[in-house]
Image (spheres, grey):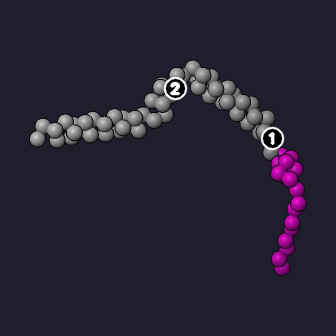
Amino acid sequence: MKVTVNIDCTPEEARAFLGLPDLRPMQERLMQELEERLAANIRAMDPEAMLRTWLPATLKGFEQLQEILMAQLTGAKRE
């Protein structure tokens, strides 16, 4: 014998029925604090420092590429 039970309820109703806590208020407070900290850090940084923080490898790679190209161009002129 096979029995199937379908329950039609919202996630909030299921959480209340199972006795689980509602974490939404805590998540909203944490997200608000995270947004405030992020905004404060962005305001405190100048654009050049932000780029160095976000793209350190890319900028170094670009500088190295420039050095290689300059070395090859100056080396080609001497030959």
The answer to which of 77 and 22 lies nearer the viewer is 77
Residue 54 position, x and y percent, is 49, 34
| Numbered disc in front, either 1 or 2 | 2
Q: Mark 1: which secondary structure? A: loop
Q: Residue 68, relative to residue 41: is it above or below?
A: below
Q: Residue 12, relative to residue 39: is it above or below?
A: below
Specify whether residue 34 is in view: yes
Q: Sort mark 1 into few (<14), some (14-19) or many (20+) by Cα contacts within 10 Å.
A: few
Disc 2 marks which amino acid?
Pro
Residue 40 position, x and y percent, is 62, 22
Residues in magenta, as a range: 1-19
Tell me how far mark 1 sits from mark 2, CA to CA. Answer: 40 Å
The residue identified by callout 2 is 47
Q: Mark 2: which secondary structure? A: helix
Residue 50 position, x and y percent, is 50, 28
Q: Quadrant of the N terminus?
A: bottom right
The residue identified by callout 1 is 22
Pointer 1 or 2: first along the chain: 1
Disc 1 marks which amino acid?
Asp
As drawn, which residue projects farthest toward the bottom? 1
Residue plotted at (78% across, 39% down): 24
Q: Residue 37, relative to residue 1: is it above or below?
A: above
Q: Quadrant of the C terminus?
A: top left
The answer to which of 78 and 26 lies nearer the viewer is 78
